[in-house]
Image (spheres, rainbow, N blue to C red):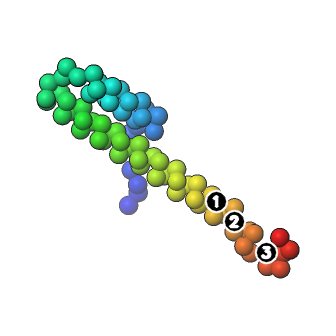
Amino acid sequence: MAEEKPELSYEQARDELTDVVRRLEAGGLTLEESLALWERGERLAAICEEWLEGARARLAAAMAERAEPADRQEGAPF
């Protein structure tokens, strides 16, 4: 099964999450509005986390790939 790509880029999700937090902190919303914003914020945070986990995995793979040639060179002085 193929992984689904988040519907927003990391930057878009982060910026919208910042706006959601700002609006919640400003207050003046009904309970229903606050709950809807909080739920949206949770979804946006999950999207950001998905992007960050993907970036961590790519970085780890690149670092492992870069380290492989050094591991294969037996008898190298350094």
- Assign a secondary structure to mark 2: helix
Q: Note whether 42 is above or below 20 in the view shown.
A: below
- How many neighbours does mark 2 have within 10 angstroms: few (below 14), some (14-19), or many (20 or more)? few
Left or right of 72 on screen, residue 59: left
Left or right of 3 on screen, residue 24: left
The structure residue drawn at horizontal position 41% and vertical position 49%, both measured from the top left corner, is 50
Q: Residue furthest left?
A: 31
Callouts 1 and 3 close, C-beta under 8 Å: no
- Assign a secondary structure to mark 1: helix
Alpha-carbon span between mark 2 and mark 1: 6 Å
Numbered label attached to residue 67: 2
Q: Quadrant of residue 68?
A: bottom right
Q: Earlier in the sequence, mark 1 or mark 3?
A: 1
Residue type marked 3: Gln
The structure residue drawn at horizontal position 24% and vertical position 35%, both measured from the top left corner, is 38
Residue type marked 2: Ala
State which quarter of the image contains the N terminus.
bottom left
Q: Is residue 5 visible?
A: no
State which quarter of the image contains the C terminus.
bottom right
Coordinates of residue 60 in the picture (x, y in percent): 57, 59
Residue identified by numbered label 1? 63
Q: Residue furthest bottom?
A: 75
Callouts 3 and 2 close, C-beta under 8 Å: no
Callouts 2 and 1 close, C-beta under 8 Å: yes
Coordinates of residue 71 in the picture (x, y in percent): 72, 73
- Assign a secondary structure to mark 3: loop
- How many neighbours does mark 3 have within 10 angstroms: few (below 14), some (14-19), or many (20 or more)? few
Residue type marked 1: Met
Residue identified by numbered label 3? 73
Left or right of 68 on screen, residue 29: left
Q: Note whether 10 is above or below 58 in the view shown.
A: above
Alpha-carbon span between mark 1 and mark 3: 17 Å
